[in-house]
Image (tube, helix red, strand yellow):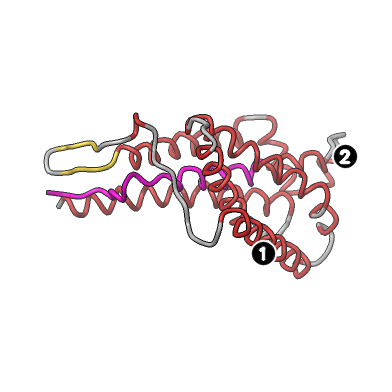
Amino acid sequence: MNIYLLQLVNGVGIGMLYFLLAVGLSVIFGLLGLVNFAHGAFFLIGAYVCFQLVKSGVNFWWTLALGPLIVGLLAWLVEKTLLRHVYQLPHEFHILVTVGLALVFQEAVILQWGALGNNVAPPESLNGVVVWGSFIYPKYRLFVVAATAVLAVAMWWLLERTRLGAIVRAGSESTDMVSLLGLNIYRIFSLVFALGAASAALAGVLALLRPNGLLGRTV
């Protein structure tokens, strides 16, 4: 029975990371109508920004905030300088531009950090395991599940209970209506794109943790 519990918790943890990726992508497509094939690249950059920060001596807990912030700023610049000019074009152009952007980011990561994967050890407070009878599971994986669950609730609250969320939902129905209300639709586009990329980067930061290969087990 414990092996099923182990796989269930593993599945929930991976699923929550996929949620962080998917929610940003869906919000970007819903509001901007942009087919963004570069979204996964922000996951990659988030992970390597975290790796570089930790390698430079920055505390991991700070990277949870700094990594998504840095990637969000990068995404904001990309949206303002490049993607804004293709919104009105057919989706085929969205695909060409964002696939090219993803390749540029990928090759930049390889040039800077190499083609082999890297990871970081979790902070001391997340080392070790939690033992429930015969079930043994790494603390850091439980932290990932808990942290992404909190972020999922926060994202739901942002989209469903705040003025920004109302604007995003209204904009996904009609950007013209939002513009007629006197709101700067392009500023909202930039903000939403940055938030979507930051959520992908946060998933990358959380996925980077690897405590000595311990995956959880039953005895």
| Position of residue 174 measured from the top left corner of the image (x, y, whole percent) | 78, 48
x 31%, y 47%: residue: 212
The stretch drawn in magenta includes residue 198: yes
Q: Label 1: how many residues lie within 10 Å, few (<14), some (14-19) or many (20+)?
A: some
Disc 1 target residue: 103
x 77%, y 45%: residue: 77
Gap in Å between the C-alphas at discs 1 and 2? Answer: 37 Å
For the residue pair 59 and 36, the one nearer the viewer reads as 59
In the visual, does 14 lie left or right of 205?
left
| Position of residue 98 measured from the top left corner of the image (x, y, whole percent) | 71, 61
x 53%, y 30%: residue: 62
| Position of residue 48 measured from the top left corner of the image (x, y, whole percent) | 55, 48
User: What number of labels is visible?
Assistant: 2
The segment highlighted magenta reads 195-219
Callout 2: SS: helix
As drawn, 58 above or below 24: above
Tag 1: residue type?
Leu
Q: Which mark is in front, 1 or 2?
A: 1
| Position of residue 108 measured from the top left corner of the image (x, y, whole percent) | 66, 57
Q: Label 2: how many residues lie within 10 Å, few (<14), some (14-19) or many (20+)?
A: few
The stretch drawn in magenta includes residue 21: no
Quadrant assignment, res 138: top left
Disc 2 target residue: 180
Callout 1: SS: helix
Are discs 1 and 2 less than 8 Å apart at CB? no
Tag 2: residue type?
Leu
In the visual, does 217 lie left or right of 67?
left
In the visual, does 75 lie left or right of 206?
right
In the visual, does 135 lie left or right of 162?
left
Quadrant assignment, res 41: bottom right
For the residue pair 23 and 198, the one nearer the viewer reads as 198
